[in-house]
Image (cartoon, helix red, strand yellow):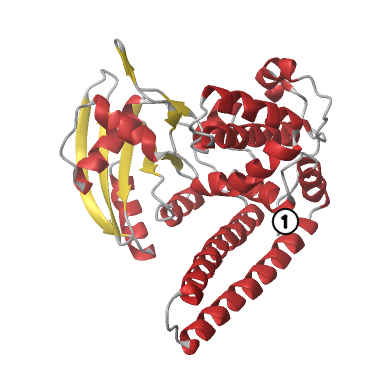
Amino acid sequence: MKKLVVGIDISMNDFHACIKLRTENDVIKIKGTRTFENTEKGFQEFYSWALKQQKNNYSLKFVMEATGIYYENLAYFLYANDQNVSVVLANKIKNYAKSLNIKTKTDKGDSKMITGFGIERKLEEWQPMSPGYKDLRDLCRELLSIKKEKQRAQSQLHALEKSHRKLEVVLKLKREQIEFFEKAIKLIKKDIKAKVNQDVVLKEKIRKIKTTPGLGFETAVILVCETNGFALFNNISQLVSYAGLDVTQNESGKYKGKTRISKRGNTRIRQALYMPSMSAVQANEPIKKLYERVKERNPDIKRKGIVAGMRKLLILAYTLWKKDEEYRKDYDWTQSKKENKSINQIPKKAEPKAPH
């Protein structure tokens, strides 16, 4: 079958599209390139343009990069029109570009490169996040954002209070700003709890994740909604990579560079796990032992132990969700790798329906 792939490089205001055809003889031809507005009208024009290139025996696939949130509206539009859509993480496209030794970066060039990636690789079809999980995700993201703004405002207030000849009107405004953030945080927390309580199964599975020392209600909900109920992953390594907690190495010959986490993933998951990890290294005995081992190997970089705890908490949440179990403090961690390899072969229990 002939393969027709549309690569899309999307930004806030517009997107560049390139269509390539791969024939039965593996000959690749560019069928066209064009720019469209990132609006509903632009989507309609783009869709009509792409369908004109499709013949009876052509398979059609749309490939785009996960660029912030700008891709979402187009992805949902194509999905609603029963089209095959793949959304690729940015680091995969970046690595693909390196393999081609591409040095010039333009929007048009990026669309061609994304099309080439879709032509060469077998990509999974994108599935939209359920409305209930999306609502929870948006609420949790706003919660994280406001918490960060509150911390920033508190630091600014502290600096103002210690400064020389501070203006009372400025202090008053800063305190009112913090008060506004605190009220907003309470309101969002209330809405999040209400959303979770709408589904009995979801509520119970969140409760089981919470039995892990260090993981609270908010963190558990963030992990679930940012991963669409962990439906995006087939194994632990995919989840860890998605969160940007996978380890990267820099070695060549006798040179051995520093190992570090990639940070090429979901920043909100890492943000949500940092403070729970700080708590877990005190309250969760297996993670405390892990922290001590890592700290012993890296006495000058204690943060690595915290990151190791973040990774372990993420894996625990995933495992408890998939197995529908509570945390067991007497669990034999030496068997964890063996169990995790077969975790997806466990017969599924009742999966929670996303709250509406």
Residue 228 appears in the figure: no
**Number of disc labels:** 1
Q: Quadrant of the N terminus?
A: top left
Residue at far front of view:
164
Front-most of 166 and 52? 166
Residue at far bottom of view:
169
Image position of 305 with respect to 187: above or below? above
Q: Quadrant of residue 196?
A: bottom right
Q: Quadrant of the C terminus?
A: bottom right
SS state under label 1: loop
Residue 71 appears in the figure: yes
Left or right placement of residue 309 versus residue 191 in this view: left
Q: Quadrant of residue 120?
A: top left
Give the percent coordinates (x, y) of residue 45.
31, 58
At x 81% / y 24%, what residue is drawn?
A: 331
Left or right placement of residue 166 versus residue 294 in this view: left
Q: In the rendered image, which residue does mark 1 sit on?
A: 355
Image position of 51 with respect to 313: above or below? below
At x 21% / y 39%, what residue is drawn?
A: 31
Q: Amino acid at mark 1?
A: Pro
Front-most of 83 and 161? 161
At x 56% / y 45%, what residue is drawn?
A: 269
Give the percent coordinates (x, y) of residue 292.
63, 27
